[in-house]
Amino acid sequence: MRKFGLIGYPLTHSFSEGYFANKFVQENIIDAQYANYPIDSIQKFSALWEDPSLTGLNITIPYKKEVLVFLNEMSEVVQQMQACNCIKKENGKLIGYNTDVIGFEKSLQPFLKPHHQNALILGTGGAAAAVEYVLTQLGIQYAFVSRNTSSHLSYSYEDLNASIMSKHTLIINTSPVGMFPHTQESPSLPYEFLTVQHHLYDLVYNPARTLFMTKGLEKGASVQNGLEMLHIQAEESWKIWNTTQP
């Protein structure tokens, strides 16, 4: 029996375990199991692989960057963005991939309009790295918004004003703000400056409509949550785990 799973902490918000359980039933996959591994320290990562049947892992908050030091090999994308959300064990080696990139790009594309030339990325974690990578590939200019502004490519939430909001019509929340059970929270944006030109993408998927999205809809903006991205990245992970590398 091949084993797969998800590491992160906490994992009360996990989507993957249920998704793969349903996939295995629907597709009559009887030689695989998927489980959550809620480890409270990345130092517990190596011990997981003492189980010889463990074949692959997904990585979520807060370990997408911390896990890099344990990898034997990395895909070119992981090397560039320094974040990993998918690991495959092959020939005794741990190989790191990033399927967030594919999931984000494919799910975003149907919503993009010609005027979406500048974006704000809320947060600076592993998911933000995937968003940054994709926006770069698409030729969309971006700036980070966080509590700690560390470069000329970043704003604090207090910096945001009518001019900045008007210019940046694509806003992606990569932070966990608004995630269940904290559904009455939202990123500290000046929502009064949103317009019908804006598109708000919340990588949070639980609840299906976050307060961030609701505030965007109230101003006529288009919105989406992160569920489709999760579906796509999960399927990409499954492909990686079941493809022999040349």
Image: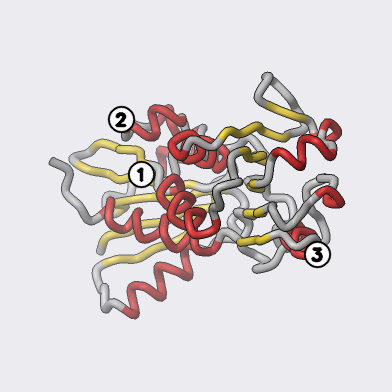
Counting residues from the start of the chain, the first of labels 1 and 2 encountered is 2
Quickly name the residue at label 1: 87
CA distance for labels 1 and 2: 10 Å
Q: Is residue 21 left or right of residue 200?
A: left
Judge whether residue 100 can be spotted in this image. Answer: yes
Q: Is residue 138 left or right of residue 118?
A: left
Counting residues from the start of the chain, the first of labels 1 and 3 encountered is 1
Q: Which mark is residue 218?
A: 3
Asked which secondary structure carries label 1, the reply is strand
Q: Give the amino acid at mark 2.
A: Asn
The quadrant of the picture occupied by the C terminus is: top left
Asked which secondary structure carries label 2, the reply is loop
Q: Quadrant of residue 96?
A: top left
Q: Give the amino acid at mark 1.
A: Ile
Q: Which residue is rendered at x = 51% and y = 39% of the image? A: 135
Residue at the extreme front of the image, as rendered = 114
CA distance for labels 2 and 3: 48 Å
Task: Give the vertical position of 51 relative to 12 (above or below).
Answer: above
Could you classify mark 1 by the number of other residues whose Cα lies within 10 Å: few (under 14), some (14-19), or many (20 or more)?
A: many
Give percent across and percent down for residue 54. Answer: 32, 52
- Numbered circles on residues, count: 3
In this orientation, which residue lies closer to the viewer: 118 or 71? 118
In this orientation, which residue lies closer to the viewer: 16 or 188? 188
Q: Which residue is rendered at x = 26% and y = 74% of the image? A: 30
Quickly name the residue at label 2: 72
Q: Give the amino acid at mark 3.
A: Glu
Q: Quadrant of residue 215?
A: bottom right
Q: Is residue 159 left or right of residue 129?
A: right
Q: Which residue is rendered at x = 39% and y = 63% of the image? A: 34
Judge whether residue 41 can be spotted in this image. Answer: no
Counting residues from the start of the chain, the first of labels 2 and 3 encountered is 2
